[in-house]
Amino acid sequence: MHRELEKLLSTAKGNEAEVSKKDFEGFKELFHRFLQVKGPSVDWAKIHRPPEDSSSLHLVQQLKWKLLHKIRIK
């Protein structure tokens, strides 16, 4: 992974390279910590489907309707 990030970083120019290098270092540190943790990070028994009237499902339905409406108008 380190080599691939370095290759990607070599494509950045100027200020973007400095910002990207800092981001990559943070990512590598976070990823290393993730690999060190033992055991499940999520208790899957506690994960439940959102209720049908939840706002996220409503938002998705609204977006679908808007997209369908745009297609129909053209």
Image (spheres, rainbow, N blue to C red):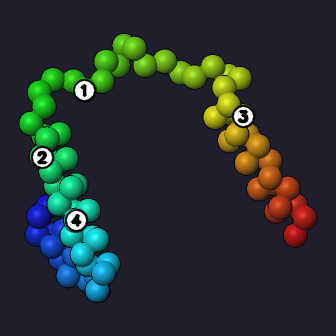
| Callout 3 amino acid | His
Q: Left of 31 or right of it: where is 20?
A: right
What residue is disc 4 on? 22
- Of badges 4 and 2, nearer the viewer stands 4
Disc 2 + disc 1, Cβ < 8 Å: no
User: Which numbered marker is on residue 29?
Assistant: none
| Callout 1 amino acid | Ser
Residue at the image point whose x is 80% and y is 47% from the top: 65
What residue is disc 3 on? 58
Secondary structure, mark 1, is loop
Secondary structure, mark 4, is helix
Q: Using the numbered discs, state the Cα–Cα distance from disc 4 to disc 3 in whole angstroms.
A: 38 Å
Q: Using the numbered discs, state the Cα–Cα distance from disc 2 to disc 1 in whole angstroms.
A: 15 Å
What residue is disc 1 on? 41
Dot 3 or dot 2, earlier in sequence = 2
Disc 4 + disc 3, Cβ < 8 Å: no
Quarter of the image for residue 28 reads: bottom left
Q: Is residue 62 above or below residue 54?
A: below
Residue at the image point whose x is 22% and y is 55% from the top: 27
Q: Is residue 73 above or below residue 59?
A: below
| Callout 4 amino acid | Lys
